[in-house]
């Protein structure tokens, strides 16, 4: 293990923390060609500006329903503080956050760690399941920043961890704690993950396989089987299926009455959990005659934070 202060950067998507930030956040998102290619490269930013302008009113209304902005920055920094506290039991660590589409960006995180005198840097994605659209894009931005600001900094990367044991146990514990709330009635477990264009998977993206590995590991602990679906589609391309709304419709037609939805690809509360799962899908389920509850996001769950610590220490050993 290297001597000296160790820097850790947690990588996440970011989100608009005020309603005024929704439109520029959407622009940053759609300007990223790692996620979607909007015509030729020279047209990307212009088309992203148009899409952001059109989508901003609807998105603002959604963020207004969850408190006026995304809590992702606050949660990510609380995760960073919790991880730093447990890592400092085993060395000199400073942990910070780099978001992809809203500040703080990678430059700011690297400058913070350089000012603190770090001798080694570890990038740890907060996406358990690798995709070029999430971890891949974040790492690309981070590496560009490192090349400009600290090209000689020793650097390691943790790009996926779909079966990390503490992560799996934390997910399983949340499921088992929530099942008794259905008062011994039959319950269907539904794992909902963020969707991706099918073209990504065809091109070799391991995202779906990673999610299936996670579910298999969780189900070994819980002894409960479930179904996988995908939420948060946008745009006229072929997306992973079934979508979460399609899954709810199918379960209703099968006579299902109770659903426990598990946010399998999200480790932090964001618009996908707070609005889509706990408002939009819960309302859809109720209209279909079903009761939908969700297991909580991991956020600063102590077992989950211990898992992040293990990932960092194993990578450095």
Image (cartoon, helix red, strand yellow):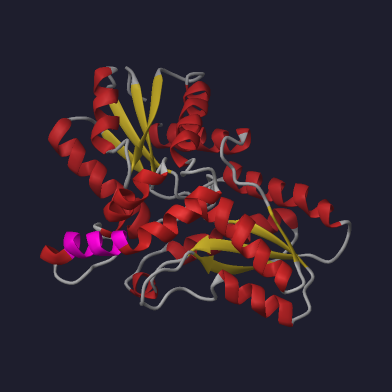
146 vs 176, left or right, is left
Q: Quadrant of the N terminus?
A: top left
- Number of on-image labels: 0
Which segment did they paint magenta?
44-53
254 vs 305, left or right, is right
To which quarter of the image does residue 257 belong? bottom right
Q: In which quarter of the image is the C terminus?
A: top left
* Along the viewing direction, whichever of 311 and 248 lies nearer the viewer: 248
Q: Where is residue 35 in the image (x, y as percent from the top left)?
A: 30, 62
Find out whether residue 277 is within the magenta segment: no
Q: What residue appears at the point 24 percent right and 46 percent down from the top-left corner?
A: 141
273 vs 61, left or right, is right
Residue at the far left: name it: 42
Q: Where is residue 244 in the image (x, y as percent from the top left)?
A: 57, 69
Residue at the far right: name it: 184
Q: What residue appears at the point 33 percent right and 54 percent down from the top-left corner?
A: 26
Q: Position of residue 272 (x, y in %)?
A: 52, 55
Find out whether residue 50 is within the magenta segment: yes
């Amino acid at each position: 293990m290297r001597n000296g202060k160790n820097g850790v950067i947690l990588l996440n998507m970011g989100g608009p923390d005020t309603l005024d930030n929704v439109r520029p956040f959407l622009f940053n998102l759609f300007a990223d060609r790692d996620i979607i290619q909007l015509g030729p490269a020279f047209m990307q930013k212009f088309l992203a500006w148009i899409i952001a302008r059109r989508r901003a009113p609807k998105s603002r209304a959604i963020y207004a329903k969850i408190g006026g902005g995304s809590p992702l920055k606050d949660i990510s920094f609380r995760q960073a503080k919790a991880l730093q506290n447990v890592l400092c039991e085993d060395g000199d660590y400073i942990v910070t956050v780099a978001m992809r589409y809203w500040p703080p960006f990678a430059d700011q995180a690297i400058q913070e760690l350089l000012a603190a005198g770090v001798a080694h840097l570890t990038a740890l994605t907060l996406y358990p399941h690798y995709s070029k659209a999430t971890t891949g894009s974040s790492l690309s931005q981070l590496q560009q920043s490192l090349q400009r600001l600290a090209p000689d900094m020793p650097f390691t990367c943790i790009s996926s961890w779909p079966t990390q044991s503490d992560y799996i146990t934390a997910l399983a514990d949340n499921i088992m704690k929530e099942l008794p709330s259905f008062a011994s009635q039959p319950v269907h477990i539904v794992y909902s993950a963020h969707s991706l264009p099918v073209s990504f998977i065809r091109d070799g993206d391991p995202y779906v396989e990673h999610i299936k590995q996670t579910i298999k590991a969780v189900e070994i602990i819980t002894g409960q089987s479930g179904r996988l679906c995908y939420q948060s589609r946008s745009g006229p391309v072929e997306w992973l299926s079934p979508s979460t709304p399609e899954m709810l419709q199918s379960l209703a037609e099968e006579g299902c009455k109770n659903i426990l939805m598990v946010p399998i690809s999200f480790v932090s509360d964001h618009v996908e959990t707070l609005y889509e799962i706990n408002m939009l899908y819960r309302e859809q389920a109720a209209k279909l005659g079903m009761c939908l509850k969700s297991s909580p996001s991991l956020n600063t769950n102590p077992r989950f934070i211990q898992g992040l610590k293990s990932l960092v220490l194993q990578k450095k050993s």
